[in-house]
Image (cartoon, coloured by chain):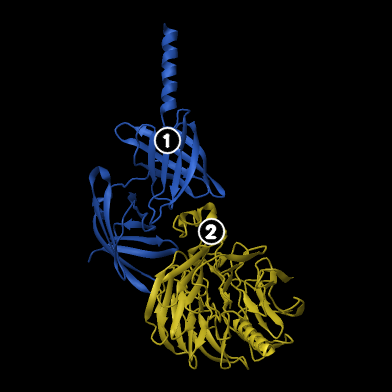
Amino acid sequence: MRLFALIFFASALLCRGAESAAGRWEGPAQIPGRELKLVLDLSEEAGKGWIGSIIIPGLAVKGAPLIDRKASGPDLVFEIKGALGNEKAGPAEIQAHLTADNRLKGNFKQGGNTAPFVLEKTGPPQVELPPRNTAVSKELEGEWKGEYELMGYARHVTMKFTNRGPEGAGLEFIIVGKKTNNVPVSLVTQEGDFVTIKSDEFGMTYEGRFRKEAGEINGSLTQGPFEVPLLMRRKP
Amino acid sequence: MSIFRLAVAAVALFCAEFAQAQTMFRGDPAHSGNSAGQAPRQFHRVKWKFPTGDRLVSSPVLQDKQLYFGGDDGNIYAVEAETGRQIWKRPTGGPVPSTPAVANGMVYAASYDGKFYALNAQTGAVKWKFATGGERRFEAKGIHGLEPKNQTIADQFDVFLSSPVIAQSAVYFGSGDGHLYALDANSGELKWKFKTGNVIHASPAYADGVLYVGSWDSYFYAVDAATGKEKWRFHGGEDPLIHNQVGFQSSAAVADGVVYVGCRDSNLYALEAATGKEKWRFNNEMSWVISSPAVAEGKIFFATSDSSLYHVVDAATGKSVLKQLDKAYMFSSPTVAGDVVLIGVLNGSLVARDRNSGDLLWEFQTEASKQNKGWVLTADRKFNGPMLYYSSWREAPTVSTDRQFSIGAIFSTPLVANGVVYFGSTDGNLYAIE
């Protein structure tokens, strides 16, 4: 009886394994003239649905978050966040179907192009969680002003930090040059006195050291090939 | 009577053939960019294609029913315009992304081996060679913001070599050694050389005894063709930060006492030919103007790189007449051929537009562009950034640019004769389409 129960339990586990998309999946997507290796890590979190990340060696994509767009039974659709997106075609996508023989078959979509793939499960998932906004210190909260010069004319920068409880800090980030840009902020962190701000959409990063005694954040703004010093001070 | 008719017909045919001759880059010494022939208003077929051993950036020129062009495989070619049959090829020691010039039975072209070649137009035999101070691409530390910023990196977009212009029994061309050269066209003897501060890969334009050419030193020069003395210089933009918005890669066109030239500082300039004084500038908001402008009936035709725009502006005022959005960067120069304007696009398309309205008449797409290996292009045939420039480390930008140019990009400027359009592609083919 105990043996029967053990076999039954083991079979159930095997069956469950065969049916679950959770795991690390690897295989090539067939784009014209090139095999593109995909490594997907998928995990199902109670109450949160699917979480995941993707690695694409050769395209400098490592641990990009997979956002659950439409997971229903064996059919899964994930958006690749922060990498391979295209202004017109939108974000890159993984559309997959879990087959009865425990493979992920589907399409990799990018820039309006579509390539088929078949992925094999190679192990348990190693989902890379995206960095999250941290809270910022009380002294950093509020409005800061600065300016920098690029290509011959000045840009005026305003940053306004607010703490939002468990969501970490929020930031209003405005750059006024020839026109006013409300920079969409992807990440705000403060580690010690080191402040990092990222905008995936603008490809922009600001890194600065918060000097409480001087009342300033002394750092640099990087966008694509440009890196300029940017000193932020309290609003006068 | 029939003999008379035959003679008239023969003369007419000779004149037609003569009229269709386009013996140097942009068709004539002043670089008007006008073709004697009418381009087709509809695409019918590929008449022939001539494969070479590497990408083809040079533009074809035509004389006596023979096409001449350079190949990045190191050869200078002569090909029968009617059939695409090779007449001869002459190897040089480096790629030839220079458009040849033909005159008095000679073909002239520059090679990346640092030598300037004069060949017999019928046989390809070398008549003389002239060694410059050596070729190089424009280069700078941290160019375009590439890493490592302290390492000098060659500009991967410096794809052309200077194309020679022939006037007053001399042949004139620029060099990576920073000089504008004047050689005796017959003997190859140096008449003079004029020093600038950086690479010259634009082609000098010639009008009324003066040469007009820009350098990567940020200056545009007018030089006396007889003496090599500077007449004036004009200062374009500078970019000491990342060396992106600097240098004249575009070749000038001269018409009615005005010089029109594009610049990497994102402007198209109109300068007084006599003084160098700026008449107007047309700003393209950080988008390079590599394309060499064409001039026809009081209008300037040119295209931009990053913003992928085809522009027509009023020659007198610089005001926009029309603009059309294309799908990718344009380094090719527009050819005005009757009521059609043709231009190559780096996504592997040749685009034909109505000269007056700018409307798209037809598009030809190279096979490599259709195959879209490695998803260089998006589904709507624009450059697919994430699949091209995913690393900025050391040589990666060069590799990325090679990838970008792998889909049959058209740098070459189209030539039109007898209803046929000839141009080169980075898929290695010289195409004849009609």
Q: Which mark is residue B328?
A: none
Q: Which chain appears blue?
A: A
Marks 2 & 1 on one chain:
no
How many neighbours does mark 2 have within 10 angstroms: few (below 14), some (14-19), or many (20 or more)?
many
Going 42% across and 50% down the picture, which residue do you hit?
Answer: A83
Q: Residue furthest front?
A: B1
Of tags 2 and 1, the one toward the viewer is: 2
Q: Quadrant of residue B299?
A: bottom left
Chain designation of label 2: B
x and y percent of residue B388 in the render?
50, 56
x and y percent of residue B361 in the render?
45, 69
Q: Which mark is residue B369?
A: 2
Q: Quadrant of residue B164?
A: bottom right
Q: Quadrant of the C terminus of chain B?
A: bottom right
Q: Return the residue at label 1.
A: A97
In this view of the protein, which residue sits in the foreground, B289 or B240? B289
Image-based side of B186 in relation to B366, left or right: right
Q: Which chain appears yellow?
A: B
x and y percent of residue A156 in the render?
30, 68
x and y percent of residue B178 in the render?
60, 79
Amino acid type at mark 1: His
In this view of the protein, which residue sits in the foreground, B389 or B312? B312
Q: Quadrant of residue B206?
A: bottom right
